[in-house]
Each structure stands twice: as structure tokens, then as C-alpha cells.
Amino acid sequence: MGWKKWARTRSPWIFHAHCGGCNGCDIEIAAALTPRYDVERIGIVLTNNPRYADIMVVTGIVPKAMVPVIKRVYNQMTDPKGVVAVGACATTGGVFLKDDDNPTYTFGGPVDKAIPVDVYVPGCPPKPEAIIVGIAQCIQKALAKD
Amino acid sequence: MIKMKERRVGALRKLLKVSLTGLKKCVTVDFPFGPPAFVAPIFRGQPEYDEEKCMGCVACSMQCSASAIKYVDEDGKRVLTVYLSRCIYCGRCQLICPQDEAIKLSQNWNLVTDKVDSVVSTITIDLRKCENCGTYFMPDKQVGAIIDRIKEKLEDSALKEQILHDVELASHYCPDCRKKLAIKLNLHTRKYV
Ligand code: SF4
Ligand code: SF4
Ligand code: SF4
């Protein structure tokens, strides 16, 4: 294992992009960061600057107005980078895509239409454990390379 | 003055108690390396079909809040699929199911995937073939369930034998052929009056 890979996989910094969700998923991400689950003990740190981040965690349906923003934020992240889509909204559209041809009028998503997604975490909202599993899979998939 | 002192002692005691709870038991769940935290008994996870009970009536598909349940009729089989990345775990399918929870929300929360349509719950049900024209028109089990329910409702009606005979006869034909063959099979309800 090269030292770069070792360093990357040991401490992935995450950037939380809230894209029009109902806050349910965001609360669960916050729960994953609290002492109960305490992901900082395994090196996962929340950062508010996409330039420092390795993994972007996206929640919500991605409204039309957010599509250019999320693309820009994604381009600001440095390589290698990964994206985790959290929740039914972010993975497929969920309840906001009741009718396939006729979604909610603000609907610009799901996330994988705007940016490439590595790992999907279904649930509405998913359990904090599921989010941790998703981030762990994203580390293996996107960051574990030299 | 005494009150102030009491309050201070109370607050100190509380502070000591809170700061000592950390010594008794570690609150952090050692999750990625150990077992996960508890799952609440009312937790709603992956909806799962019961092979025994489900009759393929697609009521769950019609009621689904997120259109997560899709079905296709192909080669004499009806395949119902719940796309779990779309499901919002509301439990309406379980609530509406006429077969007493043939679809049930389990406790499974770990559905993390890297292919969005790969996490599904499915069930395959045999369809009944029309004896006249050969098209598949209704799940076999649903026909059985309907006849059972009619039997229940009839209880001890005078026309029970006749009605059950007619229903049994009609259940082998698709709706179109039933109309065409109504006279030949003598299915008209006129004879009941
Ligand atoms: S997936 Fe559910 S909980 Fe998460 S943002 Fe969408 S509606 Fe809210
Ligand atoms: S699960 Fe229930 S509602 Fe859905 S098709 Fe089966 S019997 Fe009908
Ligand atoms: S739990 Fe709700 S969203 Fe999920 S399949 Fe059932 S009705 Fe559809």
C-alpha cells in the first residue's frame, strides 16, 4: 500500500451538500457525527470547504436551481473524489417522482444526472449506520487508489 | 440563604452524576468494527413479499406513495418488483394489502449499493390462462381468493350452490370471453329472480 493511499483512506474529509431535501437525511448525517456514532474516531471529518473535501455527501432532490451549483462544487473538489447520494430523494427522486414523466416542477435530479455518483444509500431517511456503511464503501471505491 | 446552598449542592451532585456516566458505559457505538446500534421494533425497513400469502392483486403497486412498486405480465407470469432505492418506507403497501400483510416491512436497513436499480424485492406469480382465447388475464391465487371471499359472504343463502357454480364456471375465462360465452354458459343473473 502506497503512503498516499494509506493517508487518503485513513482520514476522508466529507462535504455535506444539502440540495433541497426535507432535512430528514441531514439530521441523520448529523446523528452520524454525534458522540453516539462518532465517525471522527475513524478519521471522517466534516468540512465546509469543498476544496479540502474527499467525499461529497448529497441529500435531497437537487432542484433545477441547484444543478449548476452542485456541478460547480463538484468541480472544485480535488481528485480523487467520491460522491455518496443519501436518501430516496437523492438516489432516484423518491416521493417527488411519483409520476415518471411528470415530476415535481422544481425537480432537476436525481443527483446522478448532474454529477457522477459512486455509492447510493437508499432510505427515507437512512439509518446513521447505513450512511457510515455508504461512506466506507465510497472510500474503498473512489479513494483507495494510488 | 439555605435555599441557595441546597440548590448549589443539588447542581454539584447533578454535575458529578453526568460526568461519571461516561465511566460506567461507553455511549459510542463501535459500529463499522462491531455490531450496529439497536434497531427499534417499529423500524420500517426493506418491504418483503410473502410467497405463501401474496396473490398478485397489485393493490400495493397502486397505493405506493413513490411508485416504487412496478409490475410486468410476461409469459404467463406476473413479476412485482419493489425498487428499494425509490421506496420511502411509509408502509402504505403493508396497510392496504388485502391478504393480511403479504408485503411486510422488515428490519433490514443495510441497502447500500453502487448500482441504483440493483436493490429490489421481487415476487413471481402464475397467471391464469383463458380457456377460450388463451390470453393470460388474472393471477391464479387471486381467483381462488375471490371465490373464497364470495363463499364467506354467501353464508347460507338459498342460491349458494347456483352462485358458486356460476362463479367457478366464469373464473376460467377472461372478461371478454365471459361476455361472448354468456349465453352458452348460461351466466346471466336473470335466473336468480
Ligand atoms: S429521502 Fe426522505 S428524509 Fe431524505 S430528504 Fe428526501 S424526503 Fe427527506
Ligand atoms: S402484496 Fe398484497 S397488495 Fe401486493 S400484490 Fe400481494 S396480495 Fe396484493
Ligand atoms: S413502503 Fe411506501 S414507498 Fe415503499 S413500497 Fe410500500 S407503499 Fe411504496
Image (spheres, coloured by chain):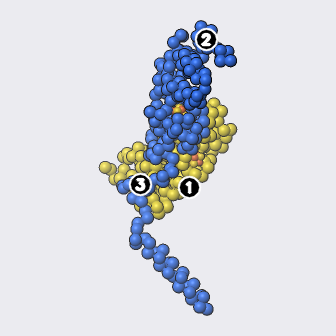
Chain colours: A yellow, B blue
Q: Position of residue B34 (x, y in %)?
A: 36, 55
Give amino acid for label 2.
Answer: Asn
Asked if one can make out residue A6 in the rendered structure from this viewpoint, the answer is yes
Give amino acid for label 3.
Answer: Pro
Q: Which residue is mark 2?
A: B186
- Viewer-proximal residue among A34 and A140: A34
In this rendering, which labeled residue sits more in front, label 2 or label 3?
Answer: 2
Q: Position of residue A6 (x, y in %)?
A: 35, 53
Q: Secondary structure at mark 3?
A: loop
The mark found on residue B36 in the picture is 3
Relative placement, left or right, of B79 versus B187 is left
The mark found on residue A104 in the picture is none
Q: Which residue is mark 1?
A: A27
Q: Secondary structure at mark 2?
A: loop
Asked if one can make out residue A71 in the rendered structure from this viewpoint, the answer is no
Mark-to-mark CA distance, 1 and 3: 18 Å
Give the residue at x 55% y 46%: A124
